[in-house]
Amino acid sequence: MKKYFLSFAIIGILTSCLLVKAYAQQDSTKKINISTSILGKEDSDKIDDKNTPAVSKYPKIFGGITFSRIDWGFSRLINDGSFTLNENNEFLEYKKASNFGFDIAQFGLRFNDRFKTYISTGFEWNYLRLKHNVLLDQDATPLDYSYPDDITYKKNVFTSTYLRVPLTFEFRSKRFKNGERAKLAVGAMTGILIKGSQRLKSNEQGSQKFKDNYNLASFQYGAFARLGYDPMGVFVKYYFNDMFENSPDQQGLNNFTFGLTLGF
């Protein structure tokens, strides 16, 4: 299933790029709407005022710098389909787990007033506030760890940082009387590992921070959905790939996140 999904994601991205290229070549007078959007507000929304007749011609290419789809929510590790970690992964038990991310650039095609597709890029962080007094070993393959006897950690946060590249298909309703819309977005999410880190704090050694890839998946992929009422919403993401690679004891450990999103 993972191979099929990865193939689908790649095909979807290539198809999107080809569609944009085809429309650009079809009409040499068309111009790409390069713009900056904040919290999902684009030029296409600005000119489509509820009191102004629609004058936009579709399809319309858009792209540029953005600061939107700001996600903040919770993470849950799923171990072989269960929220309970098996004995090989008990050292990763957490008090709290969270997810944060946002997009900084986008490029896509609006087909009509109701539907658009686009590819974007941004950053995403996953935080595990570990429950146990565990120290992850650096430069160890497969993933390894120890329990220091002479140190008690008051803070133990394991973080992964990814460059995310989602492919989105977004639908929106007609404007309501107040001018707002309901929106639904679904798509494929991919990501490239930037770094992993473990931040520790103890009375014995103070604050410490270690950086390593900790056998985290160098490439992650999954699916997501967003549902909102302009511009607020909720999101859910599920990553199909294992959270760690080259680490047999962690096979079948996946990440599931959900929460609030700002800037559809």
Image (cartoon, grey):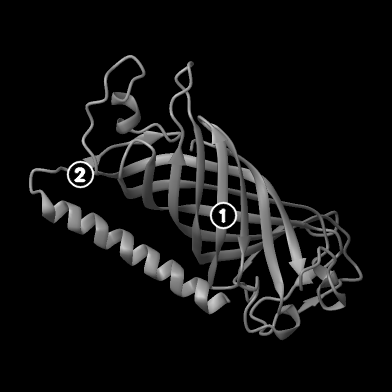
Residue 77 vs 47, above or below: the answer is below
- Out of 93 and 236, give the one closest to the viewer: 236
- Out of 187 and 67, give the one closest to the viewer: 187
Q: Amino acid at mark 2?
A: Ile
Q: Indicate left or right for 94 with 4 as reference.
A: right
Q: Quadrant of the N terminus?
A: bottom right
Q: Position of residue 60 (x, y in %)?
A: 24, 42
Q: Residues within 10 Å of mark 2 (few under 14, many from 20)?
A: some
Which residue is located at x 19 percent, y 53 percent? Answer: 23
Q: Is residue 58 visible?
A: yes
Q: Position of residue 6 (x, y in %)?
A: 49, 73
Residue position for label 1: 224
Q: Amino acid at mark 1?
A: Phe
Which residue is located at x 45 percent, y 70 percent? Answer: 8
Q: Indicate left or right for 163 with 253 as reference.
A: left
Residue position for label 2: 32
Mark 1 to mark 2 CA distance (whole Å): 27 Å
Labelled pair 1, 2 in contact (Cβ < 8 Å): no
- Identify the disc placed on residue 156: none
Q: Indicate left or right for 130 with 259 as reference.
A: right
Which residue is located at x 68 percent, y 58 percent? Answer: 256
Q: Residues within 10 Å of mark 1 (few under 14, many from 20)?
A: many
The answer to which image quadrant residue 124 occupies is bottom right
Q: Is residue 209 visible?
A: no
Element class at badge 1 = strand
